[in-house]
């Protein structure tokens, strides 16, 4: 990549958080910058987002290796694979040249690589220019999904504190200044909406949460997902991102979040959720062959989704090295995003010809955040979304909110706690 082109791409990256690496299939993403675009008065804290990615040595130094090229992939240990594991390994072998090519292109991007060690302390997020938001009271003793399962759940309320807004008078005269208002609504089994054009601070059980502009969330368990089905078919969603809590040993051992058996996901009313002109469905999956077979043979057919393409998320450290050896069977440094199109149930019109071909096999490279927190891939998918614009977007099993999106799950406010954010000192 020419130096001038590289500088232009770096400038766009600093602003938007997405760096397309030359003519390769690789995209580097800084989730902090992408997520921060959802907010006007706040920014996602790099220190909080990348808390797992920096290890401190005695004396306060950060342990970061300086030359990722010297870190060679280890030889795989001899291991006897069963039939299902052999199929999974075959998938890996097919994806391996693609992943290595993307990774090599990433390592060739010198300007980007030199930027990574400072990604947590980038001057655009300097505490000298912003100050940390603190909770207004005590920490919540129970997790959100635990609170939502107790008998008192319908009684819990969240207070949304709206700032004063200016609007034009009905006769077109001078702007009318409206005083800030507080709206108190049920927090569970209810659609909580911020229709304003700026962030809202919300208070729940003496803790503070940040709600991005023009967003809404519905916090409930899977039994209540029927409440998301739109009353009018033209109000369905045409981009649906899903990160299911698949059963896995690591999540169970760490007790990070409750998992569900695969059969539970068959009950998601996908055909009733999508827009009349169809939808793009994006599903995060692990590398387990049992899970891939379930999705391909049962889940997608039940949902009416036709598999179209696959993206990969390749995880790196702040020095540019992979988080684990590429060929380490049980801990591969990548996850998969399966993409497919779906029509709404009961609609006779065939939209297959209007669905855009997806440029698959793209590799999204990023430094991971908290356990199981996925990078915000919505902006990378918008070009493929069928139907009207702007797209009507929803994330199922969400653990954070995005501007313009509906978020559903049993803890969509998890990463909206104020401790994950910085507040600008000077508000315009």
Image (cartoon, grey):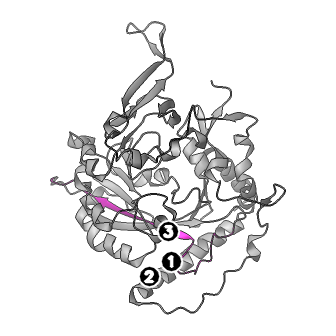
Q: Is residue 193 depicted above or below 182 in this figure?
A: below
Marks 2/3: CA–CA distance: 19 Å
| Along the line of sight, the residue nearer the viewer: 147 or 214 | 147
Q: Is residue 315 visible?
A: yes
The residue range painted magenta reads 321-346
Work out whether 279 lies above or below 170. below
Query: Position of 320 compared to 221: left or right?
Result: right
Precedes in sequence: disc 1 or disc 3 = 1
Q: CA distance from mark 1 to mark 3?
A: 24 Å
Residue that numbered label 2 is attached to: 88
Residue 427 image position (x, y, % from top left):
63, 25
Image position, residue 91 (x, y; %): 45, 80
Q: Residue at 63% across / 48% down in the picture?
A: 48
Q: Nearer the viewer, mark 1 or mark 3?
A: 3
Q: Position of residue 137 (x, y in %)?
A: 56, 33
Q: Is residue 411 visible?
A: no
How crowded is the residue under tag 1: few (<14 C-alpha within 10 Å), some, or many (20+)? Answer: few
**Residue 78 vertical position relative to residue 152 in the rendered view, above or below:** below
**Cβ–Cβ under 8 Å for marks 2 and 1:** no
Q: Is residue 329 magenta?
A: yes
The image position of residue 244, as x and y in percent, is 39, 60
Query: In the visual, does 295 lie left or right of 411?
Result: left
Q: Dot 3 corresponds to which residue?
A: 250
Circles 1, 3 touching at the beta carbon (< 8 Å): no
* Closer-to-camera residue (81/57): 57
Whether the magenta-drawn stretch holds residue 228 is answered as: no
Instruction: Measure how far apart labels 2 and 1 are at the Cα level.
Output: 11 Å
| Secondary element at tag 1 | helix
Q: Circle 1 is placed at which residue position?
A: 95
Looking at the image, is mark 2 or mark 3 earlier in the sequence? 2
Q: Is disc 3 placed on a helix, strand or loop? A: helix
Quarter of the image where one finds residue 196: top left
């Amino acid at each position: 990549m020419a130096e001038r082109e590289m500088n232009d791409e770096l400038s766009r990256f600093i602003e938007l958080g997405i760096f397309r690496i030359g003519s390769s299939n690789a995209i580097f993403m800084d989730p902090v910058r992408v997520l921060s675009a959802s907010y006007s008065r706040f920014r996602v804290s790099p220190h909080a987002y990348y808390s797992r990615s920096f290890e401190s040595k005695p004396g306060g130094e950060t342990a970061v290796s300086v030359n990722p090229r010297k870190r060679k992939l280890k030889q795989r240990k001899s291991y006897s694979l069963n039939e299902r594991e052999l199929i999974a390994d075959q998938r890996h072998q097919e994806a391996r040249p693609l992943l290595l090519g993307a990774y090599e292109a990433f390592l060739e991007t010198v300007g980007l690589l030199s930027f990574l060690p400072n990604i947590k302390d980038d001057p655009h997020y300097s505490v000298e220019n912003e100050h940390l938001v603190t909770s207004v009271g005590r920490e919540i003793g129970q997790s959100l999904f635990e609170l939502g399962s107790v008998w008192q759940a319908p009684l819990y309320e969240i207070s949304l504190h709206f700032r004063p807004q200016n609007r034009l008078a009905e006769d077109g005269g001078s702007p009318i200044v409206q005083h800030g208002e507080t709206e108190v609504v049920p927090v569970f089994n209810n659609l909580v909406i911020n229709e304003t054009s700026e962030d809202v601070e919300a208070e729940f059980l003496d803790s503070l949460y940040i709600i991005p502009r023009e967003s809404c969330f519905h916090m409930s368990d899977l039994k209540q997902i029927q409440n998301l089905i739109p009353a009018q078919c033209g109000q369905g969603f045409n981009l649906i991102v899903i990160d299911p809590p698949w059963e896995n040993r690591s999540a169970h051992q760490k007790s990070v979040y409750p998992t569900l058996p695969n059969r539970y996901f068959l009950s998601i009313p996908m055909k009733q959720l999508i827009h009349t002109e169809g939808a793009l469905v994006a599903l995060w999956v692990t590398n387990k062959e049992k899970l891939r077979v379930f999705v391909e043979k049962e889940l997608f057919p039940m949902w009416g989704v036709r598999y179209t393409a696959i993206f990969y998320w390749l995880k790196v450290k702040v020095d540019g090295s992979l988080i684990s050896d590429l060929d380490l069977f049980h801990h591969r440094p990548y996850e998969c995003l399966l993409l497919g199109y779906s029509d709404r149930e009961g609609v006779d019109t065939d939209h297959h010809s209007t669905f855009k071909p997806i440029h698959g096999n793209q590799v999204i490279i990023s430094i991971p955040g908290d356990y199981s927190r996925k990078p915000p891939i919505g902006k990378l998918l918008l070009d493929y979304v069928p139907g009207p614009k702007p797209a009507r977007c929803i994330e199922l099993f969400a653990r954070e909110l995005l501007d313009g999106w509906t978020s559903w799950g049993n803890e969509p406010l998890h990463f909206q706690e104020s401790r994950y954010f910085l507040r600008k000192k000077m508000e315009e």
